[in-house]
């Protein structure tokens, strides 16, 4: 077994595969738009087998087809996450089956989301009090912004960025 290599930029982290990656990877592999230039769509079992192969190659060589993590949100394992204050001010709603989005009932910020069946919570880094060392790469849904909000030096999109439609 080789030493594992993980690469990190300001925006991305290339890392070894985790079990929590499989559901999203399977969704990509079964999407006709994503797989347009591949021989066929993959069913969940085939997608999991591909993830297993990628993981085994990384374990063997130390590098390979890594999982890619976008760093504007950060997944934090539930056992490492705790509220220091303000939990009593949170409201939530189920935005899709099993996914809860939490909002501050005072200011409306959206600090955390969670999928009930996942072992982590999703922390919105822009809601942190201290600088996490990550800068925004783009702003989406700017059609909903107030007129005085400035977005200098990074791309803006009225809704989703075009490649996500």
Image: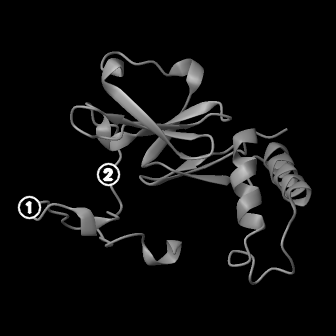
| The one of 123 and 165 positioned closer to us in this rendering | 165
Q: Can you see residue 46? A: yes
Q: Which mark is residue 64?
A: none
The nearer-to-camera label among 2 and 1 is 1
- Identify the residue at image location x=45%, y=78%: 162
Residue 124: x and y, percent?
A: 39, 41
Query: Which sits in the foreground, 75 or 66?
Result: 75
The x and y percentages for residue 112 are 43, 36
> Mark 2 to mark 1: distance in Å?
20 Å
Give the side of residue 150 with respect to residue 20, left or right: left
Q: Residue 42 location in percent, x, y?
A: 85, 67
Asked if 108 appears above or below 155 in the picture, the reply is above
Residue 66, by quadrant, is bottom right
Residue 65 appears anywhere in the view: no
| Left or right: 144, with 164 as reference point | left
Determine the residue positioned at 37% across, 41% down.
125
SS under mark 1: loop
Mark 1 is surrounded, within 10 Å at the Cα level, by few (under 14), some (14 to 19) or many (20 or more) other residues, namely: few
Mark 2: few, some, or many residues within 10 Å (few <14, many ≥20)? few
State the SS at label 2: loop
Residue 51 x %, y % = 82, 53
Tag 2 near tag 1, CB within 8 Å? no
Question: Which quadrant holds residue 43?
Answer: bottom right
Q: Residue at (86%, 81%) from the top-left corner?
A: 39
Q: Nearer the viewer, residue 54 or 50?
A: 50
Rendered image: mark on residue 148: 1
Residue at the far bottom: name it: 37
Q: Is residue 79 above or below residue 139?
A: above
Can you tell which mark lies on residue 135?
Answer: 2
């Amino acid at each position: 077994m080789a030493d594992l290599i993980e690469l990190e930029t300001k925006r991305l982290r290339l890392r070894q595969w985790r079990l929590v990656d499989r559901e999203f990877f399977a969704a990509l592999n079964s999407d006709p738009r994503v797989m347009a230039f591949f021989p066929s769509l993959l069913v969940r079992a085939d997608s999991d087998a591909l993830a297993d192969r990628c993981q085994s190659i990384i374990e063997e060589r130390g590098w390979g087809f890594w999982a890619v993590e976008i760093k504007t949100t950060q997944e934090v394992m539930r056992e490492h996450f705790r509220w220091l204050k303000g939990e009593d001010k949170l409201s939530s709603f189920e935005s899709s089956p099993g996914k809860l989005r939490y909002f501050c009932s005072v200011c409306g910020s959206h600090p955390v989301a969670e999928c009930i069946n996942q072992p982590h919570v999703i922390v919105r880094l822009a809601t942190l009090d201290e600088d996490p060392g990550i800068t925004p790469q783009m702003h989406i849904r700017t059609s909903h912004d107030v007129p005085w909000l400035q977005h200098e030096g990074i791309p803006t999109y009225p809704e989703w960025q075009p490649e996500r439609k």
